Image: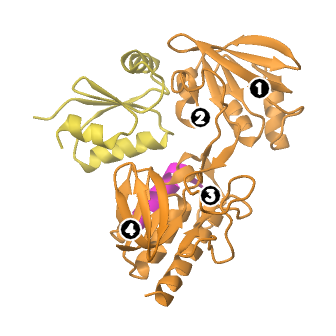
Chain colours: A orange, B yellow
Amino acid sequence: MYDLIIIGAGPAGITASVYAARKKINLLVISRDIGGQAAWSGDIENYTGYQFISGPDLAAKFEEHMRKFGIQLKEGESVIGLEKKSGSIEVKTNKGQYEAKTVIIASGKRSKELEVPGEKEFKNKGLTYCATCDGPLFSGKDVAVIGGGNSALDAALQLIRIARHVYIINITPKLGGDEIMRQQVIAAKNATVFNDAKVTQVLGEKFVQAIKISQQSKEETLKVEGVFVEIGLIPNSEIYPGITKNERGEIIVDHYNRTNLEGIFAAGDVTDVPEKQIIIAAGEGSKAALSAFRYLMQHP
Amino acid sequence: MAKSVKVYSTPTCPYCIRTKQFLRENNVAYEDYDVSVDQVKGQEMIDRSGQMGVPVIDIEGTVIVGFDKEKIKQALGL
């Protein structure tokens, strides 16, 4: 049995692991990937100590820091269940089963899906959730960005430079996001914004060929080869049914990162902590590790 | 004998970075195609893998989509 299992290896999980390792806690980190959302970020200019660093580079620094302590890591494993038993907590993954005295949930957030016909079928076949990764494959093509916030505008601005035409499908009456980005998108000659519009279907054969949109009960089909879904994030918290969450599905924690279940802590974007920032997630991770450490001292 | 390994990737995708890091850690030499600039290789990747997500790894003709460590290990015989 481990003293501590940390679920997730983004900024919160990795920082928690570093703090726990320095306390010589017997711990295991389980994560699908390393770096979490930070690894998918573009340019980071607000992480103290780095005036400028790219997302992948910061994630690599985090990982290096974690590896320095020789922390046991199960990468590529997905947690599918968490159960509190008398005297221990059981963590089930797609590959195995582990037991610990305490758990820190730092499983972060993931991209929200459209939930329309064709989305699953055409995932990676023209439809993607990562403009930064897959955008370059669409140079010279017509594409659609779904969403109207900062991440959608960011994707649109990347694509405007390389695609032939960019359609922005925004569900609200006006684009959100930062004014400076909004102006750039609106000024672009090869971009068209559809407000009050939503995607109803993704069409194609082997790859995406078009999307159906509805705008004020008017239906329209747009010929596109790429669909970039940027409609926000949802917390990876569904697999913890016994844990109290807010209306957004975020795990509710107190100042000590305690959840409603004794011995189970949570940190970072998966929680209801205000402001989702790398530096905040990292700070929350350290707090959660120290709280878990204190709990272990009190419950030997 | 060293196997022929090709990686189709973009410079900005984290799983591409992890894939190449993993190959280097295991002393596996590979050819790196940056499909964000090389459109011919980009099309080759799409034709060979039947999809458009990066990275795609080709190990002696075995095509693997994404950073799937187990499949990569198996194909390399690690």
Image quarter of residue A256: bottom right
Quarter of the image with the C terminus of chain A is: bottom left
Range shown magenta = A52-66
Q: Are marks 3 and 2 in contact (CB under 8 Å)?
A: no
Give whichever of discs 1 and 4 has the lower sequence position: 4
Question: Residue A99 got which mark?
Answer: 4
Circle 2 residues within 10 Å: few <14, some 14–19, many ≥20: many
Find disc 3 in the rendering and name its residue: A270
Give whichever of discs 3 and 2 has the lower sequence position: 2
Question: Marks 4/3: CA distance?
Answer: 22 Å
Say what secondary structure mark 2 lies in.
Answer: loop
Give whichever of discs 1 and 2 has the lower sequence position: 2
Task: State which mark lies toward you, 1 or 4.
Answer: 4
Find disc 1 in the rendering and name its residue: A169
Query: Is any part of residue A141 visible from this angle?
Result: no
Q: Are marks 1 and 2 in contact (CB under 8 Å)?
A: no
Question: Marks 3/2: CA distance?
Answer: 19 Å
Task: State which mark lies toward you, 3 or 2.
Answer: 3
